[in-house]
Amino acid sequence: MPAYLIRSAELYAGAPYAYAAVTPPGALIFTAGACPIDQQGQVTAPGDYVKQAELAVANLRTALRAAGASVSDVVKSTVYVASAEQSDLVAVWNVVHAAFGEHDAPSTLLGVAALGYSGQLVEIEAVAAISQG
Amino acid sequence: MAVHLIRAEGLHPTAYVASADQGDLPDVCQLVRAAFGAHDAPSTLLGVAVCKGGTECLHT
């Protein structure tokens, strides 16, 4: 059973994400921050927020699949962008939002001062919920 | 540089480092990894502009 996304009529209707999510009985999956690194651990696309976001999303999908879940099971994500420019955050958000499609689970988008890998601009962490059994 | 670590009961720790210098983060990552040992739970490591200190501050 997928998470049930909550939309309040009392809050701004144009937000590109649900305002809350209710998880089914079952297991929670906590992903590590998905990074724009390849299988050799190298950060890809230096300076390119969009391409780094695309690889981070791909790596998030892989981690979720390994745990028996997919992006449609995500109940909350947090998107970290190493930038103080709001336009960079929006560029990354557009990639993440497209990846989630109609399952626009609650999400938080932040600019941070730095991320862990040299040259890393984007990191995405997510909590997913799946039914047990 | 200040570090604030939330263990989240070992499920998903997040380490916040008050630094804009990416070079400071790997040192903190090693510290956190050593603290968790074989229980290398999913983790997120962030540099932030301001970090809470006080009793929860591991390193200043």
Image (spheres, coloured by chain):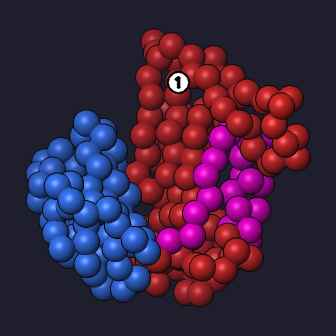
Give the x, y percent position of residue B46.
39, 67
Q: Which residue is drawn at 81% across and 37% down?
A: A11
When asked about the image quadrant of residue A84, the answer is bottom right
Question: In the rendered view, does A37 fall on the left or right side of A122?
Answer: left
The colour one sees for chain A in the rendered image is: red
The colour one sees for chain B in the rendered image is: blue
Can residue A36 be spotted in the picture? no
Can residue A28 be spotted in the picture? yes
Q: Residue at x 53, y 57 (%)?
A: A124
Q: In which quarter of the image is the N terminus of chain A?
A: top right
Circle 1 residues within 10 Å: few <14, some 14–19, many ≥20:
many
Q: Which residue is drawn at 77% across and 54% down?
A: A98
When asked about the image quadrant of residue A22, the answer is top right
Query: Which chain contains the residue that carries disc 1?
Result: A
Question: In the rendered view, does A18 fall on the left or right side of A81?
Answer: right
Q: What residue type is labelled 1?
A: Ile
Give the x, y percent position of residue A27.
44, 23
Q: Residue at x 18, y 74 (%)?
A: B60
Q: In which quarter of the image is the C terminus of chain A?
A: top left
Give the x, y percent position of residue B53.
25, 63
Q: Residue B41 lies in magenta, yes or no?
A: no
Read off the residue under disc 1: A130
The part of the chain drawn in magenta is A90-112
